[in-house]
Image (cartoon, rainbow, N blue to C red):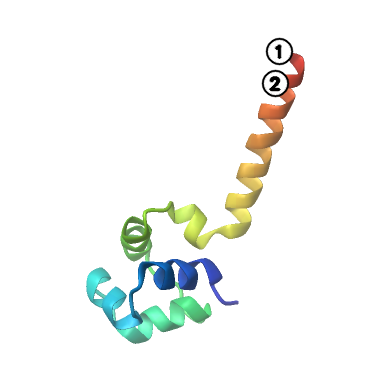
Amino acid sequence: MRNERLIKKREESGLTQVQVAELVGVSQSMVSKAEKGARTLDDSNKMKLAQLYNVTVEWLFFEQYYDQKTYKYNCQLVSLSKTG
């Protein structure tokens, strides 16, 4: 499954896959495969990409987990504001 967030952040940054690969220290092929969802990057490279794009690793790579976590957090805030 394509990582749309990874692609979007690269494009928003105005970087090519080659440039991202050089900044992170991986091959352009690895960046391409990560964007296509055909390959998983190791934790160190995930952190480098998140730092490069100024986002969290969870937001960039774990969309379902991030959305569930945010949803639960937002529900707790709403619940607290209703009772407080």
Q: What residue sits 56% from the left and 77% below the top?
A: 2
> In front: 32, or 40?
32
Q: Which residue is mark 1?
A: 84
Image position of 4 (left or right of 17): right
Query: In which quarter of the view is residue 41 placed?
Result: bottom left
Instruction: Characterize the local packing of mark 1: few (<14), some (14-19) or many (20 or more) Cα atoms within 10 angstroms.
Output: few
Q: Are marks 1 and 2 in contact (CB under 8 Å)?
A: yes
Is 78 located above or below residue 48 in the figure?
above
**In which quadrant is the C terminus drawn?**
top right
The amino acid beneath tag 2 is: Leu
Q: Residue furthest top?
A: 84
Q: What residue sits 63% from the left and 51% below the top?
A: 67
Q: Which residue is mark 2?
A: 80
SS category of the residue bearing label 2? helix
SS category of the residue bearing label 1? loop
Q: What residue sits 74% from the left and 25% below the top?
A: 79
Residue 63's tag is none
The amino acid beneath tag 1 is: Gly
Image position of 10 (left or right of 2): left
**In which quadrant is the N terminus drawn?**
bottom right
Instruction: Characterize the local packing of mark 2: few (<14), some (14-19) or many (20 or more) Cα atoms within 10 angstroms.
Output: few
Is 80 located above or below residue 50 in the figure?
above
The image shows residue 61 at horizontal and vertical percentages of 50, 62
> In front: 12, or 3?
12
